[in-house]
């Protein structure tokens, strides 16, 4: 999975290819960069390079503007909301894994034999030391 993420961030498409992939003119991509909707990587020679995640972002912008009728300001807000939802979903996933792990640990500790001076399954303290 880490390799997929690295690939997603790897800049590999020049502006003409990126524009063709998204279905817009290269000048549109330059405009999106100028207004701050996209931030392509640059080569030493200042050539723009777009990553697969950049292409995905551009496709979302196109969907918001052309299919949903949003202006660019609305598309920017929608992109921020989508990114925040993705972050929250990731946090929920991590917290769910933590809860499952803690539940397993708790179940395992309740199934193990009790040591002297410990709490019993019913929650009563057994203070005797045999």
Image (cartoon, rainbow, N blue to C red):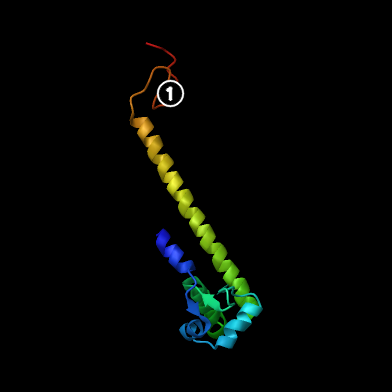
Q: Is residue 15 above or below residue 44?
A: below
Choose top left, top right, bottom left or bottom right for residue 109: top left
Instruction: Point out residue 57 in the picture as x, y percentages from the top left corner.
Output: 53, 74
Q: Quadrant of residue 85?
A: bottom right
Dot 1: element: loop
| Residue 108: image location, x then y, percent | 35, 34
Residue drawn at (36%, 23%), measured in percent from left and top? Answer: 114
Residue that extends furthest to the front in the rendered view of this protein:
45
Vertically, is 99 above or below 77?
above
Where is residue 98? Give x, y as percent: 45, 45
**Residue sticking out furthest to the top:** 130
Crowding around mark 1 (Cα neighbors within 10 Å: few <14, some 14 to 19, many 20+) is: some
Q: Residue at x 49, y 57 (%)?
A: 90
Q: Residue at x 46, y 83 (%)?
A: 21
Residue 119 is situated, as x and y percent measured from the top left of the image, at 43, 23
Q: How many marks?
A: 1
Seen from the viewer's position, the closer of residues 45 and 127 is 45
Residue pointed to by mark 1: 119
The answer to whether residue 69 of the structure is visible from this angle is no
**Along the viewing direction, whichever of 73 and 123 lies nearer the viewer:** 73
Is residue 119 visible in the rendered image? The answer is: yes
């Amino acid at each position: 999975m880490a390799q997929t993420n690295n690939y997603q961030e790897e800049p590999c498409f020049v502006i003409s290819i990126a524009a063709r992939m998204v279905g817009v003119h290269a000048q549109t991509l330059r405009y999106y960069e100028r207004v701050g909707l996209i931030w392509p990587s640059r080569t030493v020679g200042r050539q723009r390079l777009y990553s697969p995640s950049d292409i995905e972002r551009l496709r979302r912008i196109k969907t918001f503007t052309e299919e949903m009728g949003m202006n660019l300001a609305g598309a920017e807000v929608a992109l921020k909301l989508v990114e925040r939802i993705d972050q929250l979903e990731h946090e929920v996933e991590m917290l769910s894994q933590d809860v499952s792990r803690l539940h397993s640990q708790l179940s395992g500790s309740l199934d193990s034999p009790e040591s002297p001076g410990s709490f019993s399954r019913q929650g009563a303290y057994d203070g005797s030391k045999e």
